[in-house]
Structures are given as structure tokens and as C-alpha cells.
Image (cartoon, rainbow, N blue to C red):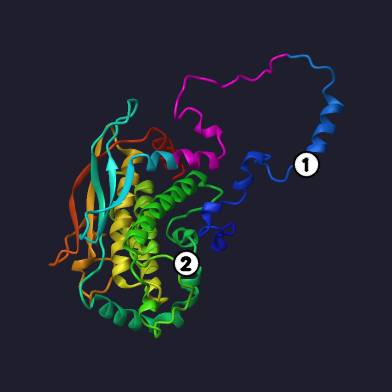
Amino acid sequence: MSGLEGYEGYEGYEGYEGYEGYEGYEGSGGRRPSSGAMNLHREGIVGPFNFIANPWPIRQGPVSTTSFLDRWDPRIRRFLFESELLSCLYFDIDAAGTESATLWHANIAPGAPPAGAWARFATIVRPTAPGIFSGQLNLVNGYADLRTDRAREIAAQIAPQYAFWATILPLYRERHARTYELIQLVLRLAKYAEMNFKNALHVTRPHEYSSQVQPMIETPAHGSFPSGHATEAHAVARVLFELVSRAPLGPEHAQLRELLMRQAARIAINRTVAGVHYPVDSMAGQALGFAVAEYFIQRCTAGAANNVASLTFDGAAYPGNQDFTGNEFYNPTTDAFMNPAPPYYARVAGAITVRQSLPLNWLWRQASNEW
């Protein structure tokens, strides 16, 4: 898998390799000769300057957000795509005393001065019920019995799980360059969402509550809730399914969707096995991951306008002894969200209108054509 199993640099992605010296970037074709060698070479072949236009056409059409995307370095496209995704999103805590925060979306029409009403896209309430964490810690302790069996799997899933996704889909860097661009963008959007919630809600990690937890891997130095692995794994699973599926959908599509969702849930549960997350973290992460995925898909594929479910996860209503299996809120067989039994800790709270982004639609079509 071209080194995917050992994918590096993700946790420090903000420091993307080589970016610090990007202004001095010297090409994308591998190691380049020194500037002195290049200067000497030019002096040896150019001769007196005599301007004559080259025989190939110069592409400089009308101003456009999509016409030249195929000509840019993928790292440059990433900035453009991220700007498209984040330009309509806003994060903030809710009113004092609500113990919640919300990711908002503005429905802004393209080609006009920015104007639009902000709507709730995803709301998460912090777990606050008395005794919830003592109940959740009992579940974390029970999962510790699986550590020996799953140790190698857990270690391999610390970084983004490209190799694992490629066990379900025939995913190759050499064949699916645009698909990889798309997945990386989904991960970045999920990271933006989850880290804002983690920071605002700042839920304490399991081993900080009890010294007996003793995680089997290093615990990340940020909040526990929601789980980033659950958010990212479910977002990628949902997006990959939509990307490769073609109508009419048959039993083979149902099987693919179920495998992708089982895998996402297992990746999330493995973080509880490792001792770094509670089940409630995974449940909230799954809900946020679905919200991120549905938003991303519509930004890439919607027509003039389309609706995306507005999701709410209420950690304060989550029972302390409630485990996470991946099937509490979403049914992969019917492809439907479900409001769990009372006290309704996860629910669809309405819908928001999301418009297509032309640059993101370009990337989606490029990736879709690879399948």
C-alpha cells in the first residue's frame, strides 16, 4: 500500500512537511539540481535573448474558481478546498449554563456579497449527569480484557486508517489520487469540528479519573469528548460509500455500507479498549462524524440547494452504563438515523440548507471518475 500503514505526520499535520519553506519550493518532480547547476546549464545553451512565443497555447481563460484546478499542486488545491468548507462554518459555545456548543452553517449564495442566516449544523451537550463517568469507567475497565488480542490493531489505527479502508475498497494511491485528496479533506473538516468541541467541552480522560485505567498507548493531550477517531472513521466511511455507489442500489451496496460502518465502529471501540476514551465519546463522535459527512457530501454534490440533517447529541442525557456498538443511532441496513429510546441522547433536530461548492464539486467528480 505504498507505505500507507506507516503514514506519518498526521498528528502534526499543521506542520505539513516542507510547508515552512514553501516559498522556496523547487518543484514536484523529486530532488532537483542546485540553483548553481541550473544557472550554469542556462548559460551554456540559451545564447543571446531573442523572444519568440513558444508553440504551445497559454491557458488563461476567464476568471474562474474551477477552470485551472487540475494544473495546481495538490497542496495548493488543499488550501482552496479547505477555504471553501470553512468559509460557511462558525463554532461557538451556547448560552451560559447550557453546557453545550454548536457548529453553525451559513447558507450563502455563490457569486454575490456574503449574506445568509446562520443555522445549527451540529450541537453537542457535555455529559454532566451525576455518576455518568463512574458508570463509563466500569465499561472502560471491562474493555481492558481485549487489549492483548487487539494490541497490534490498536497501534496500527493510531494514524488515519487508509490501509484499513483499503481492505474493504480496492483503494490504491497509484489509481485513486483524487480520492485520497478527498479523504484528506474529509479528515481535515472532521478535525476542525471535533477539536473545537473537545476544546470547548473539555471532558477529562479516563486515566485522569482513575489510576487503574492505565492506557496501553499514549493519551493525546486534548479533551476526551467527542472521540476524534469515531468522528473521522464514520465521516470517511459515509463519504466513501456515497462516492463509489451508483444507482440503482442493490444488495451489494447494502453489504458495502454495513462493512464500512462496522469498521468505523470497531476503530472507535478500539480506543475504549486502549483506555483513552469512554463509550460516550464514541457515540458523540459517530453523531458528529455523520453530520460532517452529510455536510461534506452536499457541499460537493448538491444542486442549487439541498437539505442536511441538523444533529444533536445530548451527553447530559446519556446513561452512565450505556455502551457503544455503532447501532444505537444509525441503522446501516436501512440507511436511516434513529432516535434512541428515551432519554433521546442523540436525535435529528431538523434540517439546514446547504449549497454546492463548485471547486468541491470538481474534486468530487474527479474522485468519482476513478471508480
Residue at 43% of width from left, 56% of height from top? 169
Residue at 33% of width from left, 83% of height from top? 142
| In magenta segment, residue 89 | no
Q: Nearer the viewer, residue 65 or 201?
A: 201
| Residue type, label 1 | Pro
| In magenta segment, residue 56 | yes
- State left or right for residue 247 relative to residue 76: left
Secondary structure of residue under mark 1: loop
Residues at badges 1 and 2 in contact (C-beta under 8 Å)?
Answer: no
Looking at the picture, does residue 140 appear above or below residue 241? below
Secondary structure of residue under mark 2: loop
Q: Which residues are magenta?
A: 52-81
According to the image, label 2 marks what residue? 157
Q: Position of residue 65 (x, y in %)?
A: 44, 29
**Residue farthest to the right?**
44
Q: Is residue 217 visible?
A: yes
Q: Quadrant of residue 332?
A: bottom left
**Residue farthest to the front?**
96
Q: Quadrant of residue 307?
A: top left
- State left or right for residue 20 relative to residue 215: right
Residue at 78% of width from left, 41% of height from top? 33
According to the image, label 1 marks what residue? 33
Of marks 1 and 2, which one's residue comes earlier in the chain?
1
| Residue type, label 2 | Gln
